[in-house]
Image (cartoon, grey):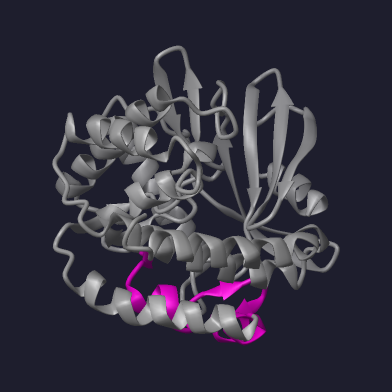
Amino acid sequence: MRRVALAALTHYDLPEGRLSFVYHGENTTFRHDSPAGRFLVRVHREQRHGRDVDSARAIRSELDWLVALRTDTDLEVPEPLSTKSGEFTVEAAAGGETRVVSVLRWLDGRIFEQTARPVHLRRLGAAMARLHVHADSWSPPQDFVRIDWNHEAFFGDVMVYGGLPASACWQLLPDELRLRFEHVSHRLQAVMASQSDIGLIHADLHLGNAVFEAERVKLIDFDDCGTGPRLYDLAVALWALRDGDSHQAFADELLQGYRSVRDIDVTHLDDFIALRQVAFDLWFTGTAQVNPAFAADLDKVHRWSMSMLELVESPDA
């Protein structure tokens, strides 16, 4: 993947610099430092946006939204870098691998995923609401294509995780956990059908994808963005905090921030947190088949899913 990234960089008007590995998960990412500044180089996984979606077109659509957000609002989101020929993506090959690559200007700041305070959720909630307000008024290009986060995408065989179709990931689940997930699927069919507040969402806007600098919050990693229930974005922000002692304080602040900009019905918030847990576990299960670091934690993630679903499905939770 490093060789692919280096091959892609020859298509950008960047001076020679240092390429440092960042993370290998859904995509493989690198940081490029040079006199021109700091950039994030993303080597995208194949079929990242579903089995029947043109990956290059989907990535360009993500970057179209980022450009629109930077043009139409004062939200701080990554700036896509165009190639020398004016394209947002390039197809690069090295070592027998051919991948779509994109480059974004790096956003400086701190991530408080492990040390969150309620104020971080309030600021995140307000920024999230402004994101949704923009999406409601924005007219995407005709060739815009992103994930449709409907019931079939979450529970059917639309997505590909770690090279495996979603149906194969379901079969890899422990029997008891698969039954719990099927119960969530059945319940969410009616819940999702009842949602009227649907539109373009980030779909992965937790505190790990929010960069804070003083009182500003910058939103990163739009790789999952697509059309879905707005309540799912709030559920994602609270999901990893749901089983902590301070979850109610975090939820109150997130909603206060969001509702300072835009109203939302949170009746089914815990249902969407359960949905997020299922989506995360299926993704983790598939990725564990090709990534040893994920494989080492797979049993722990399965146990966490069981305890989380018991929590959010309890009438006293």
Query: Is-magenta flag for residue 46?
Result: no
Q: Which residues are magenta?
A: 145-173
Q: Is residue 60 above or below residue 112?
A: below
Residue 72 appears in the picture as rendered: no
Query: Is-magenta flag for residue 161?
Result: yes
Residue 184 location in percent, x, y?
39, 75
Residue 309 location in percent, x, y?
47, 65
Q: Is residue 255 above or below residue 111?
A: below
Residue 246, quarter of picture: top left
Image point (65%, 81%), residue name: 174
Q: Is residue 58 above or below residue 189?
A: above
Q: Quadrant of the N terminus?
A: bottom right
Residue 154 location in percent, x, y?
42, 73
Describe residue 290's horizontal placement relative to residue 109 as left or right: right
Residue 251, quarter of picture: top left
Describe residue 313's horizontal placement relative to residue 287 as left or right: left
Residue 91, quarter of picture: bottom right
Front in this rendered view, residue 226 or 265? 265
Find the residue positioned furthest to the top.
214
Q: Quadrant of the C terminus?
A: bottom left
Image point (64%, 67%), residue name: 302
Residue 266 appears in the picture as rendered: yes
Image point (31%, 30%), residue name: 253
Image point (45%, 50%), residue name: 239
Front in this rendered view, residue 201 or 294? 294
